[in-house]
Amino acid sequence: MPKVHNIGSTRFIQFLNFPAVWGWKVAVKGWTQEIEEPFRSAEPIILRLPFQKAVVFGRWTGEHSEDDALNRAVQRRDLTDDDFQEEKGWVPVTDEASEENS
């Protein structure tokens, strides 16, 4: 994880390798979540530098509990029975292997 350099209590800067194809974009909006205390989150601006490098400028927008921070970092959410409805796009998996064996 790239080192975060705090500028005061609410802003930060970060330098990182960014091996992604951006096309002609020079800046994109990002998202970050600390997974160590104080578990802050931010939506920074990422500016592209030459040779697949980038500089990140951001402002911390909130603090979360440890569980929340880890869930946000891995984009986890709890599923409910409502998520498994065909009207919402869920398609049951067909078991083709059992049909071939019978």
Image: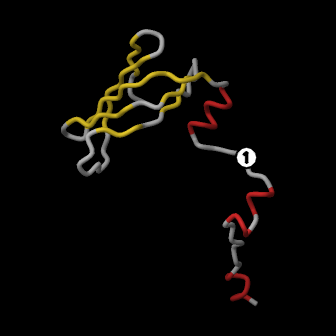
- Frontmost residue, 58 versus 6: 58
3 sits to left or right of 94: left
Q: How many marks?
A: 1
The outermost residue toward the right is 81
Quarter of the N terminus within the rendering: top left
- Frontmost residue, 42 versus 20: 42
Q: Quadrant of residue 40?
A: top right
In the depicted structure, whether residue 87 falls above or below residue 19: below
Q: Residue at x 26, y 40 (%)?
A: 26
Q: Residue at x 30, y 44 (%)?
A: 19
Q: Amino acid at mark 1?
A: Asp
- Colour convention of the picture: secondary structure
Q: Horizontal and vertical percent for residue 6?
A: 41, 14
Q: Horizontal and vertical percent for residue 23?
A: 25, 51
Q: Horizontal and vertical percent for residue 83?
A: 74, 58
- Frontmost residue, 102 versus 94: 94
Q: Horizontal and vertical percent for residue 47?
A: 29, 34
In the depicted structure, whether residue 15 falls above or below residue 78: above
74 sits to left or right of 23: right
Quarter of the C terminus within the rendering: bottom right
Q: Residue at x 64, y 37 (%)?
A: 71
29 sits to left or right of 20: right
Which residue is identified by label 1?
78
Q: Quadrant of residue 68?
A: top right
The outermost residue toward the left is 50
Q: Secondary structure at mark 1?
A: loop
Q: Residues within 10 Å of mark 1 (few under 14, many from 20)?
A: few
